[in-house]
Amino acid sequence: MPWKDIEKVRRYNREYMRRVRKEHPIRMRRKNRERLRKFRKEHPEWVKKMNERFAGQQKAWKQKNASKLRTYYRNYERRSGRKANLTNEVRKLLGGKCECCGEREPEFLTVDHIKSDRAKIVKRGIKHGNWHYYTEIKRAFESKDMKKVASIKKKYRLACYNCNLSRRVNGKCPHERAKEFKALK
């Protein structure tokens, strides 16, 4: 009888499951997903424990390999061109020129925070960085909700690097100072 030899049984079962997976991959995936959902419902404490354990492992790995991760993501964004496309779209949405001096060269233009609240954002743990600002701007314009667009225009404007940096360092752009000086005369 074949069931006496346990190795034969295991070999047969392995082969059978390989055949079934090859012949019915979608059905097997669905079945496994359902099984996993059911298990998670029945054992929430186990799921919580595993999530905590996985989060800890993931955090440790990320800290250990921080430079690798940075390089990977930087190269990924460069390779895919997604960042460049998003940047160009945002520049077009915000007018395509510096609001202060009228500079139109795309390489010189950047998104300027009108009311800089970066310290607050970092403190609250909200995601920040150009990528997040640019996606926020793009989503607001795509939604075509005028309230969102107006709030975005109150928060951000397009400025060249010179105007942006001088506002950050001196509080005002040289072009603004020149306009004020002319108004005083």
Image: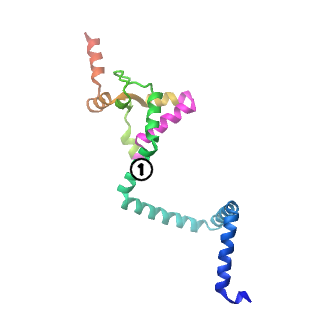
**Residue 59 seen in the figure:** yes
10 Å neighbourhood of mark 1: few (<14), some, or many (≥20)? few
Q: Is residue 23 left or right of residue 69?
A: right
User: Is residue 81 on the magenta stretch?
Assistant: no
Between residues 67 and 132, which one lies in front from this camera angle?
67
Residue indicated by mark 1: 73
Q: Looking at the image, which residue is at 57% across and 68% down?
A: 46
99, above or below 27, in the image? above
What percent of the width, then of the height, locates residue 27?
A: 70, 62
Q: Please name the amino acid that badge 1 sits on.
A: Tyr
171, above or below 130, in the image? above
User: Is residue 124 on the magenta stretch?
Assistant: yes
**Secondary structure state at the residue bearing disc 1:** helix
Q: Which image quarter is the C terminus in? A: top left
Q: Quadrant of residue 26?
A: bottom right
Task: Tell how many labels.
Answer: 1
The magenta segment is 123-147
Between residues 72 and 102, which one lies in front from this camera angle?
72
Q: Quadrant of residue 15?
A: bottom right
Between residues 99 and 75, which one lies in front from this camera angle?
75
Q: Quadrant of residue 144?
A: top right
Q: Which image quarter is the N terminus in? A: bottom right
What percent of the width, then of the height, locates residue 168?
A: 30, 32
Q: Residue furthest top?
A: 185
What percent of the width, then of the height, locates residue 160?
A: 34, 28
**Majority secondary structure of magenta residues:** helix
Colouring of the image: rainbow
Q: Looking at the image, which residue is at 70% across and 90% down?
A: 4
Q: Residue furthest right?
A: 1
**Residue 31 seen in the figure:** no
